[in-house]
Image: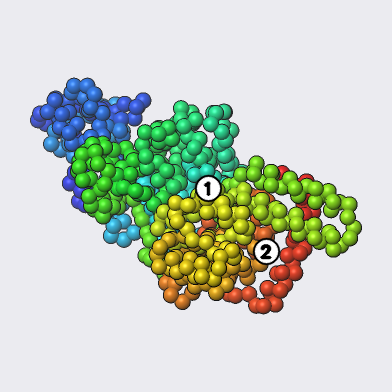
Amino acid sequence: MNGEFYGSWPAYLRDGEAEPGHVYGTLSYNRRSRCWTIKAEPCVTELAKRLFPGCDGRGRGVARFTANRRVAGDLNWLMLRYPLEIKESDRERWETALEEAREHAMRRIAAMQAPPRANPPQAAFAGELREFQQEGLAFLLGARRALLADEMGLGKTVQALSFLAATGEYPALIVAPPHLVRNWQRETERFLRAEGGLRIHVIKGLTPYPLPDADVYIIHYLLLRGWKEVLPEQGFATVIFDEIQELRRGGTGKYSAASLLSTSAKNVIGLSGTPIYNTGGEIWNVVNILDFHFLGDWESFTREWCYGYNTNVVQKPELLGDYLRREGLMLRRRKSEVLSQLPPKRRLVQEIDWDDAVYRSMMLPAMDMLEELRRVSDESRRALLEDQVCQRQRQATGVAKAPYVAAFVRSLVEGGEKVLLFAHHHAVMDLYKQELKSLRPVFITGRETDAQKDAAAQKFMSGGTDLCVISLRSASGLNLQRATCVVFGELDWSPAVHSQAEDRAHRIGQEDSLACYYLVSPKGSDRDMQDALGLKVSQFVEMMGDDKAPQEDAFLAESEARERVRRLVERLMEGQEE
């Protein structure tokens, strides 16, 4: 570090190694376990074990500490009072560790005064960050092990990918919920660049197999337990845990596997708009993945931060949040804080997973229709059959992705969003009702009386529920500006239908930036309908400008839908739908 900063170092980071006088023991580094070891008089090791619950206290006169920048600062502070002799073979490593701790402390102090900004190199990143996202990247670059806890819709995915582009520290492993694996694959392909092409591999199945060479690997949480012994040996430089609240409960196979992964990696980033679900104590499990025993062991955490020993309700959650931010472990921005940088309406297209077996089963009746289409010559009959095949495929697409749409919507509502969920088919909305029952949604589907429709809208607007499920073609006349998010679980051929649905929330009285999520499947009818709507898959690029389409454009879109239906059916007949 530059000499002019010396006087600004926090006092606990000034030189603390042994000077002439009494030396209490030694400090050495174990390369195999990657930890610092104190061998010293009992007065030192006993104090170390009491002060730092994260240290391994096994063995009289021995205290072991996992090596990281925080620990380096703690050890240096301890040596100011109890000088230790550093083994000559470890002196250079210690000096490097202390230098990194000092640099980290200075960056943290500077960031609290004026948040720095950073941009990834254009050769490695195909995107443009907003100012608050540039600050997020600078935070991640400085922290290296941290929680990015921005509210949903602020681009946590793109900030994490910009970190990979800025550092180039591959191979990287991305751990995500099952319904977001495809989106991570697509976003990674879209935004990251590498000489010779970026190599991505999605890990499949619980049974380990030899992994191919790749830059980025993607796995979902349910598979972690099967790969528990294998992945830590792969030498991942960076691990990204998306929706890290999935690890809020310890003692599970996936938690144990995630802990081993974290220990083996240099950079560990957690992403979550809702890191604390039910009780504040869950944050201890999350933080423990990022920085082991940053909050002490469980007993000391519950004793000091919670209402009592082994209870998990944090007494002063705002104080805990301030501490995590102040120590550089967590960054959280709300939409209200960055509204000046956000457009009034943001259209976010996100690819999610689907159930291929369900889709194929529902498409079986369409095979007979396709066979008839190959034989029939009457144009009116052909048009009727084409419409029937198209409707069958749209419904099959909606049903196949419904559980994953529900999982996405659940994460929004649990994160505090007020959501309008749009769909087309009654069968799809019935699945939403089943999957999202615990959220007590209301429904406006065209099957309700006017009184029931009004009661559903009133319940949503009065705060009786944070989820309203609406039929795409039943949205006219509704005023639901309490909503903060609009989600399209199914698509319509007409952009005007989507604009009208968005405007149920984007009305006078809506002061927030409205996020409109278009959830699309990798196959089925969504591909053609995306093309019809002019939608491109992107995490944060705005689509389909906010200007309302003229009436003649709406008529043109309707006429073009017939040609798109014909092309969709032709592709099915050619066997291109795998």
User: Residue at the spot x=41%, y=54% of the render?
Assistant: 414
SS for dot 1? helix
- Residue placed furthest toward the left: 21
Residue 118, position in %: x, y?
42, 56
- Residues 383 and 28: in front is 383
Which residue position is annotated with label 2?
493
Give the crowd class for mark 2: few <14, some 14-19, many >=20 residues within 10 Å: many
Q: Residue at position x 69%, y 47% from top?
A: 362
Residue 513 location (% of width, % of height): 45, 67
Which residue is rendered at x = 26% and y = 55% of the image?
A: 318
Q: Residue furthest top?
A: 60
> Which residue does the image show at 37% across and 33% down from the upper left?
251
Disc 1 vs disc 2: Cβ atoms closer than 8 Å? no
Rendered position, 114 above or below 399: below
- Residue 261 quadrant: top left
Q: Residues within 10 Å of mark 1 (few under 14, many from 20)?
A: many
What's the distance in space between the residues labelled 1 and 2, CA to CA? 25 Å
Q: Quadrant of residue 532?
A: bottom right
Q: Secondary structure at mark 2?
A: loop
The answer, for residue 491, to whether it is visible in the render is yes
Tell me which numbered mark, 1 or 2, is placed earlier along the sequence.
Answer: 1
Q: On screen, 230 above or below 188?
A: above
Residue 411: x and y, percent?
45, 52
Residue corresponding to mark 1: 180
Q: Nearer the viewer, residue 192 or 289?
A: 289
* Amino acid found under the numbered disc labelled 2: Trp
The three-letter amino acid code for the residue at tag 1 is: Leu
Residue 513 appearing in the image: no
